């Protein structure tokens, strides 16, 4: 349920360049606001001159998962069920993230509050399973379905020795689906009829299932559709190439906003910056009015710096695997990320590589609240 009624609007008055107006239509406002008299009126939690920046509140420490107790994790997503919050998160068994290609499992953790702490309850999917996204579905006979999309096949392999040097990426890490009628399992596997790297699922209000996949060969996102979550899936459209100078994009998250527009939030990065990671790309944004015709923006939705409830700030070398949590009324209230706590790993590695570099791969999963407080955005 990623679609609700309209929320508040923030007016963002943009500077004029010559006689040009800041916007001429809603697309100039990244479909995250309305263009009125040449100015973007943003729908929270979006803000900025073109409504292209997500507004966050201060985060709580410790992080959602992997910080305390100290285990390596790399993103996941949260659902609410029976007044409990369930986090399905990548955990690297016995090793740092350098070993993600061999030692990834999906842990199931719970909390009584959205902000945590999240306590591990069980292993949802054994090795090798990575980059999970849980979607709730409905079945007229059995009720709620817990549908877990992920890469790799979760066949229950034994943990491998920790990796301490470079190695090639596995030839195939396509997506698999596991379904259960309980948040604790047991989980029934379904094999997709398509290859899909880093799947981003969404069920449209009309019942159609959509699955956004990262086409690694063409460096584009491909949107598939099906009548059932398990497929068969067919191509709906291919998103355009990423904007120049924004680096490589991956890790898409697909959702509908409060007025029915489509959005993709993704990780983006470049291979040039090694020291000042806060100046490097880390996020990207596609948007569409109909799901078939897409545009993108050079405005990054978020950066590397996080503010905490005690007023302190921290720069993370990277923040990846972005996923949103939607509350009972359908508003996005929080986002989860896989983060690397090192500010950089210079001089050897560029910022996005810190996470898989030995000595820097002690990653964890960060929870960031989105802000619906207006006022400060009026520029």
Image (spheres, rainbow, N blue to C red):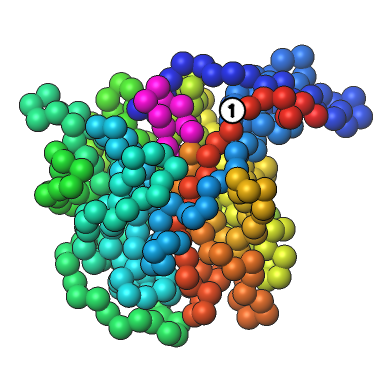
Crowding at label 1, few (<14), some or many (≥20) Cα neighbours within 10 Å?
some
Task: State the quadrant of the N terminus.
Answer: top left
| Quadrant of residue 86 within the rendered picture | top left
Helix or strand or loop: what does disc 1 sit on? loop
Q: Position of residue 38 (x, y in %)?
A: 77, 19
47 is higher (above) or lower (below) than 354: above
Q: Name the residue at the front extreme.
A: 310
Residue at figure coordinates x 67%, y 42% from the top left? 299
Question: Could one spot residue 323 in this view of the protein?
Answer: no
275 is higher (above) or lower (below) than 374: below
Q: Name the residue at the right extreme.
A: 18
Q: Name the residue at the left extreme.
A: 141
Q: Position of residue 57 (x, y in %)?
A: 60, 39
Q: Which region is colored magenta?
A: 322-333
Task: State the quadrant of the C terminus.
Answer: top right
| Quadrant of residue 164 within the rendered picture | bottom left
Residue closest to the eye, 117 or 288: 117
**14 lies left or right of 34:** right
Residue at figure coordinates x 55%, y 70% from the top left? 353
Residue 325 included in the magenta stretch of the image: yes
36 is higher (above) or lower (below) than 234: above
Residue 123 included in the magenta stretch of the image: no
Question: Could one spot residue 369 in this view of the protein?
Answer: yes
Residue closest to the eye, 85 or 345: 85
Q: Position of residue 338 (x, y in %)?
A: 47, 57
Residue at figure coordinates x 33%, y 22% from the top left? 205
- Residue that carries the numbered disc 1 in the rendered image: 372
């Amino acid at each position: 349920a990623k679609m609700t009624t309209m929320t508040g609007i923030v007016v963002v008055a943009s500077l004029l360049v010559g006689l040009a107006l800041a916007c001429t239509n809603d697309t100039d406002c990244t479909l995250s606001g309305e263009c009125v008299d040449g100015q973007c009126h943003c729908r929270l939690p979006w803000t900025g001159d073109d409504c292209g920046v997500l507004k966050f509140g201060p985060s709580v420490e410790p992080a959602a998962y992997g910080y305390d107790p100290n285990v390596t994790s790399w993103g996941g997503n949260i659902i609410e069920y029976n007044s409990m919050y369930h986090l399905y998160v990548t955990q690297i068994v016995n090793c740092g993230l350098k070993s993600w290609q061999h030692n990834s499992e999906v842990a199931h953790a719970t909390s009584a509050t959205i902000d945590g702490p999240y306590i591990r309850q069980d292993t949802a999917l054994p090795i090798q399973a990575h980059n999970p996204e849980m979607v709730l579905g409905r079945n007229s006979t059995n009720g709620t379905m817990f549908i877990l999309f992920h890469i790799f096949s979760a066949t229950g392999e034994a943990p491998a020795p920790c990796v301490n040097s470079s190695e090639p990426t596995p030839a195939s890490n396509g997506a698999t689906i596991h379904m259960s009628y309980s948040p604790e399992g047991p989980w029934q596997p379904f094999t997709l009829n398509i290859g899909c790297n880093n799947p981003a699922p969404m069920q449209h209000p009309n019942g159609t299932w959509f699955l956004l996949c990262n086409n690694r060969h063409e460096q584009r996102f491909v949107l598939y559709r099906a009548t059932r979550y398990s497929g068969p899936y067919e191509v709906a459209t291919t998103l355009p190439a990423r904007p120049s100078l924004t680096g490589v994009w991956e890790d898409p998250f697909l959702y509908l906003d409060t007025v029915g527009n489509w959005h993709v939030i993704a990780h983006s990065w470049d291979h040039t910056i090694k020291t000042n990671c806060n100046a490097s790309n880390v996020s990207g944004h596609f948007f569409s009015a109909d799901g078939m015709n897409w545009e993108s923006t050079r405005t990054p939705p978020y950066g590397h710096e996080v503010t905490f409830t005690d007023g302190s700030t921290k720069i993370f070398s990277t923040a990846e695997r972005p996923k949103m949590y939607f509350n009972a009324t359908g508003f996005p209230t929080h986002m989860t990320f896989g983060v690397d706590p090192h500010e950089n790993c210079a001089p050897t590695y560029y910022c996005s590589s810190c996470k898989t570099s030995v000595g820097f791969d002690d990653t964890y999963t960060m929870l960031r609240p989105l802000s619906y407080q207006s006022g400060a955005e009026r520029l």
